[in-house]
Image (cartoon, rainbow, N blue to C red):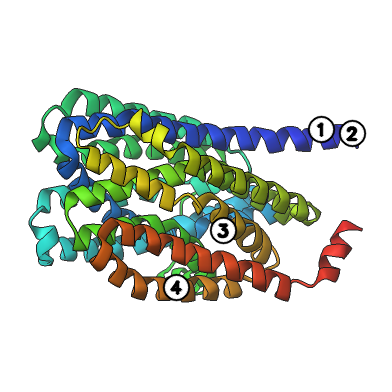
Amino acid sequence: MNLLRKKQIFHFFENVVSLFSLKSIDLALAIFLIPFLIYKVGVQNYGLYAFALSLVLFFVNIANYGFNLAAVRELSKKPKTTKNISKVFNEVFSVKVYVTCVLYLILVFLILLVPKFQSHKLLFGLASLLLISDVFSIRWFFLGIEKMKFLPVISLVATLIYVLLVVIFIQQPKHYTYIILFEFIGLLIANGISFFYIVLEYAIEIKIISVKKAYNYLYANFSSFINLLIPSILSNTAVFLVGLFSIPTHVSIMQLGVKISNAFSTVNTILSQVFYAMVNRRIHKIKLSFAVLMGVGLVLSVVMFVSADYIIKHWVKIEDTHILNDIIFIIKILSPTPLLMAIISAFGVNGLLVFNKDQILSKITLIATGIGLIIGFVLVVQYTFIGGALFLLMVRGIIALFSFVFFNKEVKLKELKQLNN
């Protein structure tokens, strides 16, 4: 028993370290590359790039149809046989192919017909390629089989290719259109290698399921889709709304604020993903997950607020002090983000979803987003990037509050007591 317990603890920390390494690579990329890009292409052109990226990432998140919840849960609970793995793999890959084809056509029509996109056709056209590279992303698979040590390797390959191309070729302001192209190349190579490695390693015979079966999968996992989609797209939505109603410089300010708040939420994101797979198998660990997530979230929010001035003044070299102060202000507004994300992770993802209350969380998320979008449009039009930050806080705050309330209402205390006995 002691040996088994030690293996479980080792496996848990291996997954935590692996995901932390993955996020560290993303963070290191942001720390190095954002100041470099702003210096080379300027704040305004960087804002155009961020605007295009926010649009495409919205479609990418739709194409990842709740797989990090539905597929991970299915893989976690079933025996890791070739038959089970192949079934889940082919379902997810088929659905992703069908959904991506439809989304790509919609994206192309938007680029060709909407004036704000049409005026930067090359930039948005190159950005659309990210949707193609994501077809081969199998992050959900590594999370489901709890072998997360492969994820940092994949990310590192994509990052090194991307950084190398950017440093060599991005030298003038007009080169901003190619930033996303280089990102696509890095992701396509890394995702392609990992995809075919898994196919060969697990002897998966790729079979595209029928359109009818794909539709049934979409219908059955709609709640998981909503529960994963909206938290994933909120940041991009805020950046996109600012880009739609304001100037590129304001988009840069909004994106930098979002990057910093996401960086401070990284630890909780990692812990949430690791606990989700673990709690689905050993549900008595749920109280431990709550305590860790909430404690870490509170500490990170406080640190984010206190350190905002120091971080920006020593990170982004912008001569315009007004813009610099605006970035610091946005970071301080967004400082409750890690705590709010922790509450959602604890009582929503690792709470309601673990007890199969998917529909409740999806309704909470949809209602909160609907309210947030209505008020968010007004806020962004009136207050630009400050409105974008307030929109983010409002939606996350509503989801966090109702996740807590409905978890305590729907999951009976006696159920938790039974788990601990």
Mark 4 to mark 3 CA distance (whole Å): 18 Å
- In the rendered image, residue 420, in percent from the top left (x then y), is placed at 87, 57
Which residue sits at x=59%, y=71%?
Answer: 402
Mark 2 to mark 3 CA distance (whole Å): 31 Å
Which residue sits at x=18%, y=50%?
Answer: 248
Query: Is residue 324 in view from this perspective?
Result: yes
Amino acid found under the numbered disc labelled 4: Tyr
Residue identifier under label 4:
215
Q: Earlier in the sequence, mark 1 or mark 4?
A: 1
Q: Which of marks 4 and 3 is nearer the N terminus?
A: 3
Amino acid found under the numbered disc labelled 2: Asn
Crowding at dot 2, Cα within 10 Å, few <14 / some 14-19 / many 20+, comes out as few
| 312 and 234: which is toward the camera | 312
Amino acid found under the numbered disc labelled 3: Leu
Q: Earlier in the sequence, mark 2 or mark 3?
A: 2
Do the residues under discs 4 and 2 have CB atoms within 8 angstroms?
Answer: no
Residue 16 horizontal side relative to residue 53, left or right: right
- In the rendered image, residue 87, in percent from the top left (x then y), is placed at 56, 57
Quarter occupied by residue 411? bottom right
Residue identifier under label 3:
69
- In the rendered image, residue 262, in percent from the top left (x then y), is placed at 45, 46
Residue identifier under label 1:
6
- Locate the C terminus and report the quarter of the image it occupies: bottom right
